[in-house]
Image (spheres, helix red, strand yellow):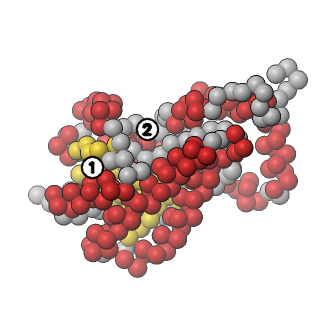
Amino acid sequence: MKKRPIALITGSSSGFGMHASVALVKAGFYVIASMRDPQKRGPLDKLANLHIATEHMEVISLDVTNPVQIEQAIADIMDRHGRIDLLLNNAGCAYGGFAEEVSPEQWRSQFAVNVFGLIDATRAVLPCMREQNAGRIINVSSISGRFGFPGLAPYVASKHAVEGFSESLRLELLPFHIHVSLIEPGSYRTAIWEKALQHQQSVTSSAYSGQMKQLRKQVESLMLSAPEPDEVIRAIVRAATTAKPRFRYPVGRGIALMIAAKTLLPWSWIERIVTKKLTPSKND
């Protein structure tokens, strides 16, 4: 029997990482689902038991902010499996808040996970992928990597960094038959935005309190109408399995229109539209 290709996924305890772990097993991969705290593997195990033969998946502990642990995990995978065919960089977090009021610790934590953790995991798998002369690296970005929403500056800045890193990396690795792709989701029903707003407490004396109140309304409204992440998972599977994966996979309701608007409209128009959305009404 032909061996399954090996996929390593970061941030698999919930959200896109959890669903992608199961979907990639269905697509023919042997999945190594990693998470910072394996005690939180319950939802993944429950989903896996419903949909896949679980002998094709294992769970490992991996904190992407710990470079030593990353190196050890990759070395262990290579010892046991001899190759890594796919890296899905999904681990991420989001800090909400206006730039002035986000603490230095939160800024650094945002980049430690979303940017430096992704870079460290990527660099750790590259030697084996180059040796194989083949591989896939899929980085989960966001529409926030293309559009700078107010009140989300740490997250937006981190995703812009992921976009730039991925663009350079794609061009560097094509000669080695290693394909880099970006998944750029819009709003989907995951826990990340709920957690983001929990980090940012309302401060009535803040100069930004009115804008923050409107931002919370916008995010809460989006979350009520946000779909399940099925479309994002299908994009991940396409990027992992198609013969010639695209570089960017924007996914979600209104995302193509938003990208086109930023490209085609004068910036002053965009400023007016966004400012109007965040301006409190007289009744607020």
Q: Position of residue 122 (x, y in %)?
A: 40, 62
Q: Quadrant of residue 124?
A: bottom left
Categorize mark 1 by other alpha carbons within 10 Å: few (<14), some (14-19), many (20+).
Answer: many
Q: Is residue 2 left or right of residue 136?
A: left
Q: Quadrant of the N terminus?
A: bottom left
Per the image, label 1 sits on a secondary structure element best described as: strand
Q: Position of residue 222 (x, y in %)?
A: 63, 32
- Extreme residue in the top direction: 283
In the picture of the structure, the residue carrying the numbered disc 1 is 32
Q: Residue at x 43, y 38 (%)?
A: 15
Q: Quadrant of the C terminus?
A: top right
N-terminal label among 1 and 2: 2
Q: Is residue 258 left or right of residue 283?
A: left
Q: How many marks?
A: 2
Q: Residue at x 38, y 70 (%)?
A: 178
Q: Is residue 282 left or right of residue 15?
A: right
* Residue 103 seen anywhere in this rendered image of the structure: yes
Kindly report the distance in space between the C-alpha atoms of the residues bearing marks 1 and 2: 16 Å
Q: Check the image and report above or below for 169 versus 193.
A: below
Per the image, label 2 sits on a secondary structure element best described as: helix
Q: Position of residue 110 (x, y in %)?
A: 54, 47
In the picture of the structure, the residue carrying the numbered disc 2 is 15
Q: Residue at x 42, y 50 (%)?
A: 65
The amino acid at mark 1 is Ile
